Image (tube, rainbow, N blue to C red):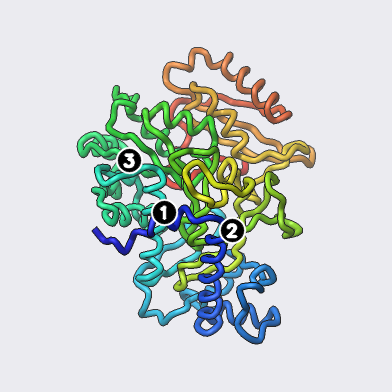
């Protein structure tokens, strides 16, 4: 077991002043390094008026970084862009973003930066209650999308047996979970629900599997109460949310006390919550865009990166788990650019999922967006669980009533044939143009 991949657990329980002091020390080293070695950030900061390395106290005046900037830089400096702090021969891992929001961004990591990914995942596992006795099954394709690569590689570092689901069908993955007596399932929330549905279709009760914990990322679902409840009920296991991004790293996790949101790993990241338009600081309990700066990934750094994730900062304080890390109430609430204006009403996809997942009879759904008389309209296609079709008309009416009561919006619902809607192993794309 590689002890280098462990952070001292005592660091996770630092008081707030000590934590901020540690962040400032790491930030100073990072800013000095980037000024001297990273042409992307040095040029960016010089254009903003800096003539020497920014100081830690200058941090809040530094310009924001966007994904489009990184994509444009990669186009101008092919193939990997100029946001590389070290010579190319120092990099040992290449991944890219999922591409769900546009052109994929290629990201590279040095051995040091990749070790940090694994350390972050060691914290995620530890916070969820994973121990050396666990067997971790990662239901993931292991393609170039960074996804759960670090989770798979961190498992042996904490003494766990890591089981790969790469190159397997869903049926084979179900069989492997039982055959190898896996105790922890790592996948997207949508895929956990699909595996459970598939198990029932095969006459298998997933709640009787050895799985005791599930850890999810890729979608906001595992922080949506109705979705979390569905996963926990289906698998008879405790469900934990996690958040990360290829260009940032694995930045958030849900602790074992499950306080109704996810913690930001503030040993590795500085977080801010800003109004997406004015970019002013948002008060606690108000939603805004999450801005992140990584402190331990010098190979491919991002400073004041606009994640596009909509979050709500909880008032600072020590969680029952012992950590003083910032808590994001409700986890990632959605994407800033995912907000739909349906007949004048602001709606996020997560709000619609929250309603639909509260109906046990709903197996899958998709939203179809169209324009009608100059306004955006949303129609929903809903697929019911086997055995629920005979009550379809009554269920359809109940779903429409609940949507109207919760969202103050009338949304037409169409019942889809069993098995006709797509299932997703990676990030879902449930809302699309009609």
All told, the count of numbered labels is 3
Residue for badge 1: 147
Compare residues 7 and 336 and report the one nearer the observer: 7
Answer yes or no: do the residues labelled 3 and 2 have beta carbons within 8 Å? Answer: no
Question: For the N terminus, which image quadrant?
Answer: bottom left
Q: Residue sitting at 29 percent across and 61 percent down?
A: 3
Mark 3–mark 2 distance (CA, rounded to whole Å): 29 Å
Compare residues 338 and 287 and report the one nearer the observer: 287
Q: Residue sitting at 64 percent across and 70 percent down?
A: 59
Residue for badge 2: 271
Quick one: label 1, few (<14), some, or many (20+) residues within 10 Å? many
What kind of element bears circle 1?
A: loop
Q: Residue sitting at 36 percent across and 78 percent down?
A: 90
What kind of element bears circle 3?
A: strand
Q: Closer to us: mark 2 or mark 1?
A: 2
Q: Earlier in the sequence, mark 1 or mark 3?
A: 1
- In the rendered structure, the answer to whether residue 320 lies left or right of residue 155 reads right
Compare residues 303 and 74 and report the one nearer the observer: 303
Answer yes or no: do the residues labelled 1 and 3 have beta carbons within 8 Å? Answer: no
The circle drawn on residue 184 is 3
Q: Earlier in the sequence, mark 2 or mark 1?
A: 1
Mark 2–mark 1 distance (CA, rounded to whole Å): 22 Å
Compare residues 389 and 109 and report the one nearer the observer: 109
Seen in the picture, residue 14 relative to 385 is either above or below; the reply is: below
């Amino acid at each position: 077991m590689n002890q280098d991949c462990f952070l001292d657990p005592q660091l996770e329980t630092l008081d707030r002043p000590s934590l901020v002091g540690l962040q400032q020390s790491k930030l100073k080293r990072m800013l000095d390094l980037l000024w001297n070695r990273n042409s992307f950030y040095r040029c960016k900061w010089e254009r903003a008026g800096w003539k020497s390395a920014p100081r830690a106290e200058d941090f809040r005046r530094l310009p924001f970084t966007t994904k489009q900037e990184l994509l444009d830089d990669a186009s101008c400096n092919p193939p990997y862009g100029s946001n590389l702090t070290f010579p190319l021969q120092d990099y040992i891992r290449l991944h890219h973003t999922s591409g769900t929001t546009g052109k994929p961004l290629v990201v590279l990591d040095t051995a040091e930066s990749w070790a940090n990914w694994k350390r972050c995942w060691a914290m995620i596992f530890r916070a969820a209650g994973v121990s050396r006795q666990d067997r971790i099954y990662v239901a993931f394709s292991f393609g170039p999308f960074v996804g759960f690569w670090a989770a798979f590689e961190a498992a042996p570092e904490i003494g766990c047996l890591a089981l790969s689901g790469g190159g397997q069908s869903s049926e084979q993955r179900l069989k492997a979970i039982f055959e190898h007596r896996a105790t922890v399932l790592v996948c997207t929330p949508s895929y956990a629900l699909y595996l459970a549905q598939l198990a029932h279709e095969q006459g298998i009760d997933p709640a009787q599997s050895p799985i005791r914990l599930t850890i999810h990322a890729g979608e906001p679902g595992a922080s949506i109460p109705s979705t979390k409840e569905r996963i926990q009920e289906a698998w008879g296991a405790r469900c934990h949310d996690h958040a990360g991004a290829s260009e940032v790293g694995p930045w958030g996790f849900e602790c074992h006390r499950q306080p109704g949101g996810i913690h930001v790993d503030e040993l590795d990241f500085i977080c801010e919550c800003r109004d997406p338009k004015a970019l002013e600081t948002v008060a606690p309990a108000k939603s805004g865009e999450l801005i992140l700066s990584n402190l331990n990934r010098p190979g491919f750094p991002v400073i004041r990166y606009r994640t596009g994730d909509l979050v709500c900062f909880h008032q600072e304080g020590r969680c029952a788990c012992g950590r003083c890390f910032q808590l994001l109430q409700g986890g990632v609430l959605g994407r800033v650019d995912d907000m739909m204006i349906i007949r004048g009403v602001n709606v996020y996809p997560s709000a619609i999922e929250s309603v639909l997942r509260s109906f046990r009879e709903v197996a899958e759904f998709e939203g179809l967006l169209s324009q009608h008389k100059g306004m955006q309209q949303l129609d929903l296609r809903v697929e019911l669980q086997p055995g629920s079709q005979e009550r379809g008309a009554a269920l359809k009416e109940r779903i429409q009533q609940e949507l109207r009561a919760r969202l103050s919006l009338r949304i037409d619902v169409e019942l889809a044939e069993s098995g006709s809607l797509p299932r997703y192993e990676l990030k879902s794309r449930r809302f699309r143009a009609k």
